[in-house]
Image (cartoon, rainbow, N blue to C red):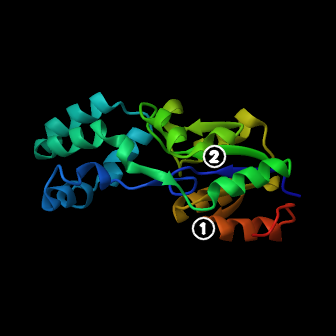
Amino acid sequence: MIDTVVLDLGNVLVRWDPYRPFVGRLPQRDTDAFLVGFDFLAFNHRQDAGRSWADARADLAASAPEHLPALDLYVEHFAETLTGPVPGSHELVRDLRAAGVRLLGLTNWSAETFHLAEPAAPAIGLLEDVLVSGEVGVAKPDPRMFALLTQRFGLRPERTVFTDDSATNVAAGTGAGFDAVLFTTAEALRTELLARGVALPRT
């Protein structure tokens, strides 16, 4: 019997598009050089794991100063990366609450920008709590993140569905004993939960 659902936030409840801060502000070639050629995702993972943006800027100044203008734009306009709720996610969270399912968030997110999440996707405010990687200094797929989740909220992983849009994080959740599901759409997740006996209305 499933009694808890743990949701990733980025591209599960709130849409995240890292290109948006650069539109009309930085040439496309420079944007691509920063987000792709520089491997921004790996750089940003350190923010998820607790590094401050001030330290990130100092690190970049020492290693790749040509990307400082792009980093500054990204941080200054981070709110624009959050483009609204993932379709169907608010309704699913609402229905899970109505069904009496415990709802938690588990997100890789900088502690300095997390306050912008809920205004972009109000469903986040319907969750009991969110474990934010940047606040605890460890990020998915590190097993310690799942151990902390389990301990902090007194979870029974075998009775908890964890969903994430990253296959790597889903595999880590499975390894930690959770019933982990790769998120594709809210409707697909609803189907997965119905198959597990969660009392949800069909849409």
Is the N terminus in the top left, top right, bottom left or bottom right quadrant? bottom right
Residue at 55% in and 39% down: 118
Q: What residue type is disc 2 on? A: Ala
Can you give x and y, in whole percent of width and height, for residue 174 in the image? Answer: 67, 60
**Residue 185: numbered disc:** 1
Decide if residue 159 is on the left or right side of residue 71: right
Q: Looking at the image, which residue is at 16% across and 40% down?
A: 68
CB contact under 8 Å: marks 2 and 1: no
Residue where numbered disc 2 is placed? 123
* Left or right of residue 171, residue 179 in this image: right
Q: Which mark is on residue 63?
A: none
Distance of label 2 from label 1 (alpha carbons): 15 Å
State whether residue 109 appears in this view.
yes
Residue 37 at x, y = what percent? 21, 60
Q: Nearer the viewer, residue 76 or 102?
A: 76
> Picture coordinates of residue 61 (x, y %)?
15, 36
Of circles 2 and 1, the one toward us is: 2
Which SS class for mark 1? loop
Q: Residue at x 82, y 71 (%)?
A: 195
Closer to us: 152 or 113? 113
Circle 1: is it few (<14), some (14-19), or many (20+) Cα within 10 Å? some
Judge whether residue 157 can be spotted in this image: no
State the SS at label 2.
helix
- For the point 49% across and 52% down, the residue is 84
Q: Name the residue type under label 1.
A: Thr
2 or 1: tag closer to the N-terminus: 2
